[in-house]
Image (cartoon, helix red, strand yellow):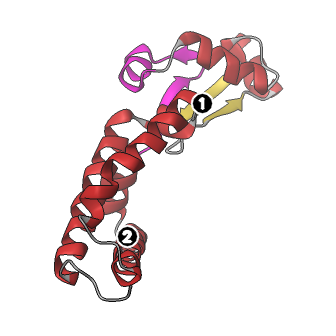
Amino acid sequence: MFVPSVAVGELILRAAIIYVFVFVLLRMLGKKHVGEMAPFDLVILLILSEAVQNALVADEKSVTGGLVVAGTLFGISQLIGYVTWKSKRAERFLDGAPRVLVRHGTIDRAAMAEEKITHAELIEALRQEGCTTFTKVRYAILENDGAITIGLRSDQDSRAGKA
C-alpha cells in the first residue's frame, strides 16, 4: 500500500510533463475560454483529467505514489506562482497580458478577433455595466481570467468630446 511500484523520480517527471502539457493547452485555448467555463467545457476538463491520469501515475497504485504526484503538481504550481511574482516578464509569458478591446468608444476588431470575442459577448459585458452604447465606453479590457472590465466615460469626458 505504501511501497511505490514506479520509481519516485519517474513519478515526478511524469507529473511535470503532464502539468506543462495541460498548461500549454489551456493557454492555447485563450483567456475567454478559461474564464467562462460552460457545462461542455467542464465535461472536457473532467475527461481530460481522466485521460491524463494513467500518464501521471503509470501503474502506480500506492498511497505514496499518489502523494508524490500530488506534491509534485502542488510544488510546480507554487514554483510558477513564485516565479511570476518575482518577474514581470515571466508573469506576462505565463499568465498573458490583458487586452484592450475598446478604447474611447472605438472597438479594436483585430484584438477581438485574436481573442475570439464576439460582438455579442462585448455587448453583454456592456449591458452588465448598465451601458447601452459604445460612445459611453472609455475602455473595455479582456482580463487574464477571461472577464471583461468596462470603464465608462464620466459626464465631463462626454461634454469635452462634444465641445
Looking at numbered disc 1 in the image, what kind of residue is underneath it? Pro
Q: Between residues 130 and 59, which one lies in front from this camera angle? A: 59
Mark yes or no: residue 163 visible: no
Question: Could you say where residue 41 lies in the image, as x and y percent from the top left?
Answer: 51, 32
Q: Which mark is residue 73?
A: 2
Question: Could you say where residue 49 lies in the image, as x and y percent from the top left?
Answer: 41, 50
Question: Could you say where residue 128 lies in the image, as x and y percent from the top left?
Answer: 77, 25
Q: Is residue 9 left or right of residue 24?
A: left
Q: Is residue 79 above or below residue 141?
A: below
Q: Residue furthest front?
A: 1
Q: Is residue 7 left or right of residue 70?
A: left
Looking at numbered disc 2 in the image, what kind of residue is underneath it? Leu
Q: Secondary structure at mark 2?
A: helix
Q: Which residue is mark 1?
A: 39
Q: Which mark is residue 98?
A: none
Q: Badge 2 local density, few (<14 within 10 Å), some, or many (20+)?
A: some
The residue drawn where x is 17% and y is 81% is 7
